[in-house]
Image (cartoon, rainbow, N blue to C red):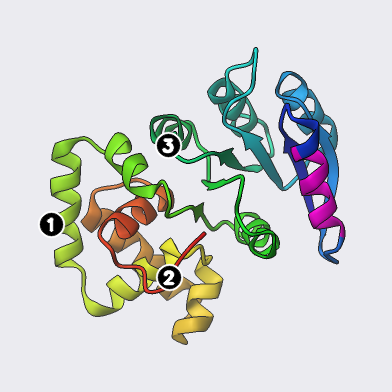
Amino acid sequence: MIRVVVVDDEALVRFGLELIFRGTADIDVVATTTGALAVREVGLRGPDVVLLDIRTPGVDALTVVRQLRAMPRPPAVAMLTTAGSGENVAAALRCGAAGFFLKDTEPQHLAQYIRTLASGGVVLSRDVTRSAADDYLDTAARSAASAGVARLTKREREVLVLLAEGLSNLAIGVRMHLSRGTIKDHVSTVLAKLGVGNRVQAALIAQRAGLLRRPGA
């Protein structure tokens, strides 16, 4: 069972998300709370995934992300956002967030997003990816990343695409009929060629480069 905490200062948003997940057999919303109480509730509940509103009145959401990621058993944190907040999204990713998606995301996609986050994948809404990538990466880094993409082999590019679509190493291995260890080696090579330190950065670069083959949320 995947344990989830929803953090949003709007009661209607909290209720709506809890209601959506109530119909899934493998996801349990163990708490809904406001930004001010987020760290305490997460500490008490020990969730696998936290959905955190990027705008929490009276509380710095970025500080909350840092505190959650510094816990002994840190949950995966995904930011709930609205269109046009790329700068805040980029800052949240730097603080350790595993992804972000819009509050008006289609409900049928949400359960799979939670499963992706719980398995170590990333969830990045393509509606705000380009602005977030531009804020996340400076000009030199974007240039280096573009050169890195060009150096990827066909197999490495396929790994990058699947990584950017949110698949874990295990899931990528199943898709490509390769061992988990082999995929781990490919991911390490991809990150090195792109000059980035984590999967979120790689996924942003892949999306910005137009490598994804299917529409995202």
Question: Nearer the observer, disc 1 or disc 3?
Answer: 3
> Mark on residue 84?
3
Q: What is the chief secondary structure element of the magenta stretch?
A: helix
Pointers 1 and 3 in contact (CB under 8 A)? no
Q: Type of residue at label 3?
A: Gly
How far apart are labels 1 and 3 at the CA level? 28 Å
Q: Position of residue 170 (x, y in %)?
A: 55, 72
**Which one is in front, 167 or 6?**
6
Residue drawn at the location 42% of the way across and 30% of the way down: 91
Residue 40, how many percent across, how many down? 79, 23
**Circle 1 crowding by C-alpha within 10 Å: few under 14, some 14–19, many from 20:** some
Q: Residue 22 carries which label?
A: none
Which residues lie in the magenta part?
13-22
Residue 162 has which mark? 2
SS for tag 3?
loop
Query: Which image quadrant is residue 152 in?
Result: bottom left
Q: What residue type is labelled 2?
A: Leu
* Pointer 1 residue: 147
Q: How far apart are marks 3 and 2 (CA)?
A: 26 Å
Badge 2 density bin: few <14, some 14–19, many ≥20, Cα 10 Å: many
Question: Is 75 situated above or below 66?
Answer: below
Sequence order check, earlier mark of 3 and 2: 3
